[in-house]
Image: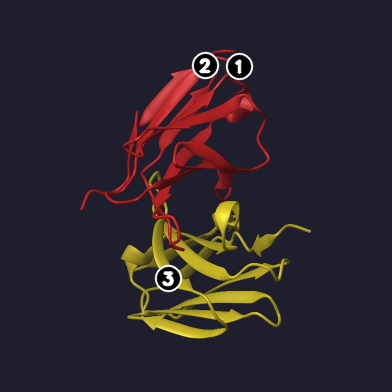
Amino acid sequence: QKEVEQDPGPLSVPEGAIVSLNCTYSNSAFQYFMWYRQYSRKGPELLMYTYSSGNKEDGRFTAQVDKSSKYISLFIRDSQPSDSATYLCAIQGSGGSNYKLTFGKGTLLTVNP
Amino acid sequence: ETGVTQSPTHLIKTRGQQVTLRCSSQSGHNTVSWYQQALGQGPQFIFQYYREEENGRGNFPPRFSGLQFPNYSSELNVNALELDDSALYLCASRNQGAETQYFGPGTRLLVL
């Protein structure tokens, strides 16, 4: 079983739609949960970062973590064509070398005007 | 504040050659990690450097090695290149003790 599972899509939605992106993970020792956005041929850009179970909101983006079911989600409201990118979930431990990020495969999102 | 920079942006090598990739960390960041991202995959952790020493390594063979310099910049060296080493190589930096890492634009390596 992979440490982080993410549906690679691709996902295509009309402008203004609500987008839901999801990942599951297997190791309950992971403590930090990130979402990165990666445009084509660019490096990943940190979007959201959360530590505990629950929701964290930043503008049109909401990150949700359920540690009991090892499930993390990213919701994008009022999606825009500029949101078209690959979205990577990443999880991380703490302390020393446990700061490495373990990524999902990424979900390719296209928002159509 | 200067972000993470990497050089070169693109590189073509042949099988068996050696390559050196370079990274300058974000201003004030003292820890650097390297990741390999194959096409269609998420980044895979190679190793992390702090205080000029490797202090964490992923599942990569010894022909992947690195250095960190006193100014926190870093190099990734890959010997005896194989076709499967073709990938985007990403550098990420953070301050020791901080949870969030910030990535550079990457170096795209093609091995023929």
What is the display colour for chain A? yellow
Q: Looking at the image, is B91 positioned above or below residue A48?
A: above
Which residue ends up furthest to the left in the rendered image?
B1
Residue type at mark 2: give it: Gln
Tell me where residue A77 appears, x and y as whole percent.
40, 81
Q: How far is disc 3 from disc 1 in space, using C-alphas?
A: 38 Å
- Classify mark 2: residues with Cα within 10 Å, few (<14), some (14-19) or many (20+): some
Tell me where residue A109 appears, x and y as whole percent.
47, 63
At horizontal 40% and vertical 40% (from top left) the residue drawn is B106
What is the display colour for chain B? red
Tell me where residue A89 appears, x and y as whole percent.
54, 63
Element type where label 2 sits in the image:
loop
Colour logic: by chain
Does residue B16 appear left or right of residue B23 in this picture? right
Q: Are marks 2 and 3 in contact (CB under 8 Å)?
A: no
Q: Chain of mark 2?
A: B
**Toward which corner of the image does residue B91 lie, by quadrant?**
top left
Q: How far is disc 2 from disc 3 in space, using C-alphas?
A: 37 Å
- Classify mark 3: residues with Cα within 10 Å, few (<14), some (14-19) or many (20+): some
Q: Chain of mark 3?
A: A
Residue type at mark 1: give it: Ala
Residue at image mark 2: B18
Residue at image mark 3: A48
Mark carried by residue B80: 1
Tell me where residue A61 appears, x and y as whole percent.
40, 77
Q: How far is disc 1 from disc 2 in space, using C-alphas?
A: 6 Å
User: How many numbered tags mark residues here?
Assistant: 3
Residue type at mark 3: give it: Met
Does residue B2 appear left or right of residue B55 in this picture? left
Residue in the foreground of this view, choosing between A49 and B94: B94
